[in-house]
Image: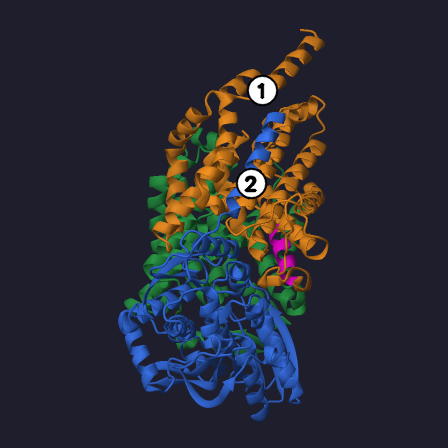
Amino acid sequence: MLTILFDGIAYGMVLFVLGCGLSVTMGLMNFVNLAHGAFAMLGGYVAVQAMQRLGVPFLASLPLAFLAAALVGIALERLIYRPMYAKSHLDQVMFSIGLVFMAVAGTDWLMGSGQQFIHLPGWLQGRFEIAGIGIGRYRLFVIAICGLLAFSLQWGFTRTRFGSRLRAAVDDARVARGLGIPVNRLFALTFALGCGLAGLGGALGIELMGLDPTFPLKFMIYFLIVVTVGGTSSITGPFFAAMLLGVADVVGKYLVPEIGAFIIYALMVALLITRPHGLFARART
Amino acid sequence: MTHRRTLLGGMLGLALAASTSGYALAQEPVKIGLILPMTGPFASTGKQIDAAVKLFLAQEGASHGGRKLEVILKDDAGNADQTRRLAQELVVNDKVAVLAGFGLTPLAMATAQIATQAKVPEVVMAAATSSITEASPYIVRTSFALPQAAEPMADWAAKNGIKKVFTVVTDYGPGIDAETSFAAKFKAAGGTVESVRIPLRNPDFAPFLQRVSEAKPDALFVFVPSGVGAQFMKQFVERGLDKAGVKLIGTGDVVDDDILEGIGDVALGAITTHHYSAAHDSPANKAFVAAFEKANPGMRPNFMAVGGYDGMHLIAKALESTKGDASGDKLIAAMKGASWESVRGPVKIDPDTRDIIQNIYVRKTEKVGSQLYNVEFATIKDVKDPVKARK
Amino acid sequence: MTARSFESRVGHALYAGRRWHPAELAFWLLAFAAFVLLPSQLLLLNEIAILALFALSLDLILGYAGIVSLGHAAFLGMGAYAAGLFAKHVGGDPVAGLLAGMSAGAMLGLLTSPLVLRGSDLTRLMITLGVALIVYELANSLGWLTGGADGLQGVAMGPVLGLFDFDIFGRTAYLYSLSVLFVLFLVARRVVHSPFGLSLRAIRDNPLRAAASGVPNARRLAAAYTLAAAYAGAAGALLAQTTQFVSLDVLDFHRSADLMLVLIIGGAGYLYGGLVGAIVFKLLQDAIASFTPQYWMFWIGLFLVLFVLGGREIIHGVVKGVAGRLSAVRKGAVR
């Protein structure tokens, strides 16, 4: 039972890293970016290519995945995302679905439609047992990395100047701008960071979720659930939402596999009905 | 609004008048409508079959029975009503003599009615649910039926000291087919079976594998769509199930030749039953694999490719025996009972069910040189689809 | 201004909106004429008609009531399965099946409307999506009823009105779908130009003010949502009947996503938006798919991005040119 809990936490951690960038961009610019998964896919493919073609070790491929996704994120934000901020939600949804379609077909064309695989170094393979709990080494590794990330994000968000400016901008962009906070640059940076995190999550998730050109479509729903359930104004919200979903999904499928497919959707609908603004939403006027 | 209603009536009347005029099949050349998922999650199926069809035409030439074969490729993206519309358009507008392809069961099923209505043979090159060939008297299959591969696995397991099996299948048509036929056969042979089904959209296999590991079976029988097979195997090993002495068995779908290299060493030792392996030891197959890999660098032919290759072979052969007569009834009659030496071994189209009769091989995944292959070590000859054979 | 003169002005405006514009007549004449003009494209035309009806349904809630939805496929699928099962187990009469499909869609709409009517846009997107996914999984797991992933087999249709059999060329199918689309369009046209439609737009534009003016927001929205669900159910029923097959695909996410694209292309908030969008979308998809069968998705995506980034004004300029001053006349009249 504890083993399965552990598995669920690892899974939730990956969901968190994948989704937290989206929640910040959504909260900050009120921009619905369904193409978030495309950045995760990009990170995943960069990691795979770096390992297969260039022989980069697994650990070194992770920062590469982060950087590549972040750089592409900055470039796209500058070039095509910026004019979208002023448009309606619907336009944004369409625009980012368009991007997803392009990413899916483009990746298919460049890389082929097959599943991508990585070979983990020996020390991350296999599992060991502590007090009867089976612990997969890779899952432990994922939890460690993502936990560290979540912690530093939370710290950065609440304790640094960047974080306080960001929170100010999320709360009220107009006032923040009036106070001399460079909201646009702040947003570009945050966007890049979010994309980079997605890229990292994509690379980390290959072993747990697989990677193929349809990745952005397949997992879009999961990201969106994390964000909507978690709310868009903090790090802790998406974090707990991701944990809850990861654990509920894995444990639920373990206990009652017959209804495995329904669990997360039902959970999402139930949560949204009871807490329409997310788990940890502050009361807004 | 009355005038509009009269207009509507007039239009309907016109439709009736127009539908009485008949249509004739074009004379030359013989067109084959090839409908495959070239995009979407099942694109690899489409690409394998497309490559095999092109290879066939390059090797055997396009002229058969005095007629030239012309293949029209359409992409249905694995979407059933798209398939149906494309098939309908191919029949009505392009006047194709044969419909072929069909990557998934619902796609083949959606087209069955068109085949019957238009009397056009539908050559199923991939989809594997048993009941497909019963959907229309014009359906012929050159791939395989899942129970055909799953039941020999149950036999082999029962004979090789396996008493308790846990089955894990994806919760959709072929998965359920594999589970039920395996479980029935294995129970009949005296074994015990526990089962669990995985939802179609499922990123993480941990909860299901955990159940398996707690049940401590002798073997784990698995059927998942070929793309996610790799992940499944990796997690199987990650969970230490291989070291706990659980054998991984299944139909050949999980160790698909197309992705076997990507799965990597975790696949070693998996025992599977299937109708084709790229490592099949025959001169014809060696030549086929070499030609296929030459024409499509980086791709290894899998059972989908062979289904497509044999499908074309069957069409060409039927056309030769009708001496170029491409009418549907003649073609289907010529296809029934056709037999030939395929690259997978001897095959025959069952004249009663129009399904394929073929050898099923028991294989073990091994390293051959630096690459992984499914090496065949036992053969069960001339297997019919057991589900239809019992009827 | 006295209350009576205000009322009469509103009544006049509504009446003006109901008047038929010549461009509208031309549109429908062309749609029926396509049957004779494009005899080899009837299957595609049939799909366009069905998609147009589906888009009309989304337009009713999105364009007129301001409810965003990423899960409209749930109603399409509900209608399709209901009509398919009706044909299989009850009888092959298409019109009865159509009604069955519509009521199934409406039922689901009514049941889920309390969920949808709360929360922000984003919450609505997610809830509709969640409902669609749950329905999808239900259809998949109720294999004994729906045929699961194999699709629903054995849907045999009788002739339309007892007279016209479905043929392989899609002749009856197209005329049948187009007629249903036309009739339902007339109903929708009447609805949006009624006081009810007006109150929906009031809610869309400013829910608080609408509530303050005595509009029962929740009930009106629920009614609109249910009506739209019935329309989507009708589209699903048409799909099931003309293809005589239902698969899980009717519930898939891409249906809902495509539908949004259709409405974005055609423009939401006027009834012809969905129709025009459906025509453009299908023609585009067909043209691109026959041109590059493997990568049409890329081009559709590129088209969308460019479209939202600035191409829409150009296309809508053309559309408006064709539709004449229709929308201008109507807007002028309402305001």
Give how far across and how far down residue B272 sits, in percent: 49, 82
> Which residue appears at 35% of the width and 54% of the height?
A106
Give the chain of mark 1: C
Q: In terms of depth relative to the viewer, which is nearer, B44 or A39?
A: B44
Q: Residue furthest top?
A: C1
C136 in magenta: yes
Q: What stretch is highlighted in magenta?
A: C132-141
Check the image and tell me how it is coloured.
by chain
| Residue designated by label 1 | C19
Q: What residue type is labelled 2?
A: Leu
Label 2, secondary structure: give it: helix
Using the image, tell me which numbered label, if any, was put on residue C175: 2
- Disc 2/disc 1 C-alpha distance (Å): 25 Å
The image shows residue A282, relative to residue B167, as above or below, that is: above
Give how far across and how far down residue C190 sits, in percent: 64, 27
Q: Is residue B216 left or right of residue B291?
A: right
Chain coloured blue in the rendered structure: B
Q: In this view, does B367 lie to the left or right of C246?
A: left
Chain coloured green in the rendered structure: A
Which of the two discs, 2 and 1, labels the residue nearer the N terminus?
Answer: 1
Give how far across and how far down residue A146 sits, in percent: 48, 60
Chain coloured orange in the rendered structure: C
Q: In this view, does C155 lie to the left or right of C266?
A: right
